Image: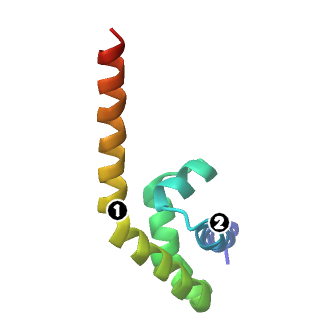
Amino acid sequence: MFATEWGEKIRCVVLGEYLIEHRATVRNAAAAFGISKSTVHKDVTQTLKGVNRALFDEVQKVLQKNKQERHLRGGEATKQKYCLLHRSRKAI
């Protein structure tokens, strides 16, 4: 096995553990580790499945929950954006 394959397997386990421990989104994990969202997503949805099936199953639960809640997070972000805009206009 090549060194890069070991690195990928270790990285996918570390990312999986991070997602579970922090109940993080793929975007949060990518920012925390300084890698792309695509890399995080591929590691936890494809690579992890062959490395640690139990961890993969737990990560899938977190990802599914995040997917179900994403419209709420998006709505909250929009609300905050317009509240901030409203406050800044009111201050002028």
Residue type marked 2 = Thr
Question: Mark 1: which secondary structure?
Answer: helix
Residue type marked 1 = Arg
Q: Residues within 10 Å of mark 1 (few under 14, many from 20)?
A: few
Q: Position of residue 63 (x, y in %)?
A: 44, 73
Judge from the rendering whether residue 14 lies leftward or rightward of residue 91; answer left or right. right
Q: Residue shown at 47%/54% (left/top)? A: 27
Which corner quadrant of the image does residue 16 belong to? bottom right
The quadrant of the rendering that contains the C terminus is top left
Q: Is residue 46 above or below residue 54?
A: above
Judge from the rendering whether residue 61 lies leftward or rightward of residue 12; answer left or right. left
Q: Residue shown at 67%/69% (left/top)? A: 14
Residue at mark 1:
70
Residue at mark 2:
4
Q: Position of residue 36 (x, y in %)?
A: 48, 52
Q: Residue shown at 56%/57% (left/top)? A: 29
